[in-house]
Amino acid sequence: MYNHGFRQERSGSCAVVRRWREGSSYESREVTGTEELHETNRHCNLRINSMTTDFDEIPVIDFEQFLNGNMEEKIKTAKTIGEACRNVGFFYLKNHGVSKQLTEDAMAQSKRYFALPLDVKMKQAVRGQPYDDGRGYSPIFVENFSDKKGDFKEIFDFSLEMKEDDPLIKQGGKLYGPNRWPELPGFREVLYDGYFSAMIELARQLARAFALALDLPEKYFDSLTEKPLTETILIYYPPQKLDKPLDPNSVGKWKSKDESVVFILKKREFESVK
């Protein structure tokens, strides 16, 4: 997904982004309370009506009853999510089952990776790799979805781990393949075995909520999430000086379209742009 993450003007920032295929755009606001929040964008190939309702805030939805409640409670939560999708397009999700410690560990690993020398990170470079799967490292200005210079950011992408002899790869399926991991002890274990796996499960539960919101059986979409085209992106926006006008060719992320089913973004504790 693109148009994601955060940019901090004075001191570089990292973001851990979860995407269920392509594209998204956010404006963040502060939420009162101490709950761990994720912001979710549901731009529906499935939604029935376009957004027509005015709103003045992004709703906060408690996912606890959907994860642990009875069917009546699940449907009630799902309908709330459906209303947010149709009328707002975004919502904050709390009590979603992904621990604060796990997300903090993932963020720490992201910072650890981007602090490596460029020549070390380029060993995982996306370009020139097989499978055409977009996995690995991309330096500043490589991602470009505009007529400008490119995005002023570094990224590291990884997806569902698949072996080279997987039937989908043998059949020429694009965007599938093995991940390219750096030689950092604990990096893969925290980010893939821990964070990625937890977010995959959360996305699957959201797919079930979407099904109930559409008056479909809860597990209607389960068969479509067995080997999903899902991706996690680590993003680093290098600091930019404020003592001179911003170079129009050095924007952290240019506007792009959302073509995803669902996009989940970890909320940070400082003000952000899209």
Image (cartoon, rainbow, N blue to C red):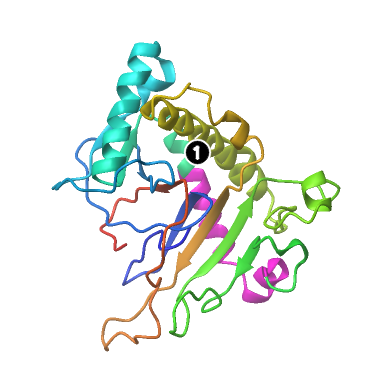
Going by the image, does 136 lie left or right of 100? Answer: right
Residue 128 left/right relative to 4: right
Is residue 120 located in the magenta-colored stretch of the structure?
yes
Question: Which corner quadrant of the image does residue 76 belong to?
Answer: top left
Q: Quadrant of residue 92?
A: top left
Using residue 49 as the reference point, say whether residue 120 is left or right of it: right
Residue 171: percent from left, percent from top:
81, 52
The answer to whether one can see residue 35 in this image is no
Residue 215: x and y in percent read 39, 24
Query: What amino acid type should be assigned to the residue bearing mark 1?
Result: Leu
Q: Image quarter for residue 184?
A: bottom right
Closest to the observer: 105 or 256?
256
Is residue 136 part of the magenta span, yes or no?
Answer: no
Residue range of the region highlighted in magenta in the rendering: 104-126
Instruction: Report the quarter where the C terminus lies.
Output: bottom left
Task: Identify the residue position indicated by label 1 in the image.
Answer: 102
- Residue visible at 71% across and 46% down? 161
The residue closer to the viewer here, 109 or 45, is 45
Q: Is residue 163 among the parts visible in the rendering?
A: yes
Which residue reaches farthest front? 48
Kindly identify the residue that appears in the image at 74 percent across and 73 percent down: 128
Q: State the SS at label 1.
A: helix
Residue 232 versus residue 35 in the image, above or below: below
Query: What residue is shown at x 31% (from left), y 71% (from top)?
Result: 9
> How packed is label 1: few (under 14 Cα within 10 Å), some, or many (20 or more)?
some
Image position, residue 62 (x, y; %): 30, 28
Residue under the image location 58 percent in, 29 percent down? 222
User: Would residue 137 appear left or right of 53 to someone viewing this image?
Assistant: right
Q: Give residue 82's position: percent from left, percent from top.
A: 32, 34
Q: Magenta region, mostly helix, strand or loop?
A: helix
Label count reads: 1
Which residue appears farthest toward the right when viewing the image? 165
